[in-house]
Amino acid sequence: MNAITLDTPLDGVVGGRTSAALKKALGLSTIRDLLWHFPRRYSARGELTPLAGLPVGEHVTVLAQVLDVRQRRMQRGGTLLEARITDGFGSLQLTFFNQAWRAGQLIAGARGIFSGKVSEYRGQLQLQHPDYELFDQPAGDGRALPELSPEHSQQLDEAAALAFAMRPVPIYAATSTMPSWTIERAVGLALDAVVGTGALHDPLPGEVRRSAGVIALEPALELIHRPEAQPDWQRARDSMRFREAFELQLALLDRRRKLAAVTGTARPRVTGGLLTAFDAGLPFTLTAEQIEASDTISQELAAQVPMHRLLQGEVGSGKTVVAIRAMLQVAETDVAVGSAAVEVEADGAAAGAAVANATGGRATVGGQSALLAPTEVLAAQHFRSVQEMLGPELTERLHPVLLTSKMPAGERRKALLALASGQAHIAVGTHALFSEGVSFYDLGLVVVDEQHRFGVEQREALRLKGKNPHVLVMTATPIPRTVALTVFGDLETSFIRRVPPGRQPIETFTVPIAERPKWAERAWVRAREEIAAGRQVYVVCPAIAAGTSEEQDAGLAAELAEIAKAETIVVADGRKPEAVPLASVEQTLAELSERPDYRGVRLAALTGAMKSDEKDRVMRDFAAGNIDVLVATTVIEVGVNVPNASTMIVRDAERFGVSQLHQLRGRVGRGEHPGLCLLLTHAAPGSLARERIEAVAATSDGFELAERDLHLRREGDILGTAQSGGKSTLRLLRVTEHGQLIEHARELAAQLLQSDPELETAPLLAAQLAEEARQQSLDNLAKS
Ligand code: ADP
Ligand code: MG
């Protein structure tokens, strides 16, 4: 017989039917799957209710003794089992349909705890299909229950009842076909099968366990599923949570160590070349922090070990220019490239010929960089700002191309050719960049913009388009340290905390419409005053037209859905949130043009639904001062720089994420005039939605705001799809709550790796890491 391990399939342990149901309902197929399906919460059985005076319709738990049991066939078929129970004062009927086998348990005299919902049938109180647990199981061999003296009996009952009532009941994430108590039973069988067999080897070295104060794996699993009392499951859950944090940090640190052992291509800086020309053409001088980050990056690019760096920065701190400088360094370095495998989708022959032409037989063309953005709109904006920053000459030399999935086929093919031939040194695009048909001549640097919308896997997919290229990840706004450690724990970090000098302060105010209708009106008057003073105004709306909504990236949509789920968007005037139509660009334009005081004010719309050339025209007009009020969706979130714009009004501010609002308001206060940002909202005071908006109003420091935002998110996993280290690792760990634990786990993981890099003292951990790495490379093989 094979020894039972955690990988043993469930059917032999819990039976064929239950295992099939567990698989279907919850996707659990091995003992490990089941034992790591932790209870979502625990409920106390609670107070015992006396049988006299039971409340109909309520859930009760009673301590009682079976008086008598009757069984009968029902007219319409099936059986009915009725048991009468009493506590000496009142009595209650239990009914079970088609469960005649319970007659073997519920015999007269048996005592236990019964719990269920009280109903009334023909004047008789009853519990239908109650949950119950008997204290003195009738002996299977037919012996009668021992006679007890009344006092003794009562004592025994009370002690047992107390223990039973105190014992927390695990409540599992369940489905209608797989109720919690069935899971509980299956987990019990699985535990019985493995506890004491040595199958639950603890992968954590004793040293780590002691430093972290966690209990061994076997008791931890036992107590998380079968606690006797509340402190049991709390201790067990803390231990299992630490294990999650530790294993994740170990994987990230190990990944970082392994990446450092890989060789890529050195792209050293060339003095007096493109970079010098670029710097000379910049209309500003770089800040000290920009220079510091740039220098670090420059040195890392010059090494054979690929760079893996996270650049965190405040909104408007000038990360783009740092990224472009890195791209220039890569573009400048001529590296001998072997015969690059050139594949262009569809017409391969024509492409091959074109490549031969474009490269003119040269062996070296300088390295390429890819800049990855999360949405089409952002990619297009990045593309434009790259061109702008480079200026005409460098643009011509470096030939940046845009690549998104919505491009016309002809344009796309041209871009693909330019990349495959090495003619284009910079590619800006969405995830279309790492789709199948894309190949680079010599991809030297991958830049991923915009925080944690991309996961490790996507970063990895793009990395595979080159031979161990350097990687730079940039966040759009600062992120909390614990999120950085969890999502980007495999990267080194640089910070740009301050925006360039000369920026004006931005004042932000919450304008609660329902409570303060006059304030809302005042917002429009205030904007009008700015226009009269010659300044310009942005108005941001969540929708383009009534009944529509602007394109949202998946990460934000998930964040907002999470907030909505927590039932926190409460509208102050009593309406349901969905009954309040979203403020739209169209409607706002109409409203403003009808206001007498806005007569003569030049209004224009800017939305993602407009054609690119139309958008360009509007943006140029606004930048030139030919438009006073730009009514827009979040398309202006990034890349828009109009120094004369002083005021921003955001309508339905509760529809935007905290970092999105922070990013949005960064559009004003860019010139000589102080910025003003008014956040109009329907969110009721005290609601989470309102607190988030107030947090944005309370601080303009993005790093501080990020921490506040983290604490405001009570439930849910803010990592979304970006979880590091594989699919199913985070069950108990929440970066929102367990910051200290994560830090501690990281310290201990680093200590372990330092004293024992190959994990010889922790072979089980080593095996886990190897397995994870193997799975990841399989995933990646499947993708590339
Ligand atoms: P973010 O870090 O938010 O991506 P950007 O890279 O878009 O910020 O830069 C914001 C604006 O600041 C741009 O218009 C850019 O040209 C400008 N900028 C960048 N660095 C400096 C600097 N050192 N001095 C003045 N302006 C700068
Ligand atoms: Mg940016």
Image: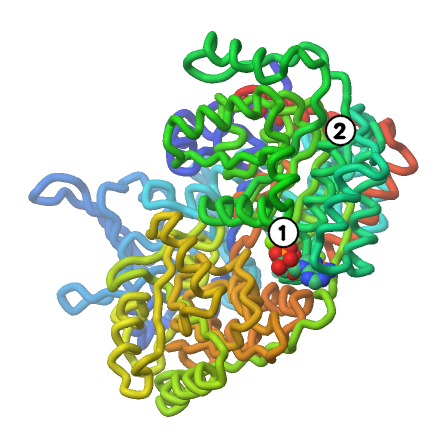
Image location (x, y in percent) of residue 658: 53, 65
Seen in the image, is 498 located left or right of residue 426? right
Per the image, the residue denoted by label 1 is 733
- What colour scheme has been applied to the protein in the rendered image? rainbow
Q: Residue at x 54, y 53 (%)?
A: 717
Q: In the figure, 411 relative to 561: above or below?
A: above
Question: In the rendered structure, are the residues bearing label 1 and label 2 in contact, judged by CB atoms less than 8 Å apart?
Answer: no
> Hey, what amino acid is under mark 2?
Leu
**Beta carbon at label 2 within 8 Å of ligand 2:** no
- Residue 197, by quadrant, is top right
Residue in the foreground of this view, choosing between 647 and 195: 647
Q: Evaluate whether residue 34 shows in this view.
A: yes
Number of the front mark, 1 or 2: 1
Q: Secondary structure at mark 2?
A: helix
Image location (x, y in percent) of residue 523: 42, 84
Q: CA distance from mark 1 to mark 2?
A: 21 Å
Per the image, the residue denoted by label 2 is 764
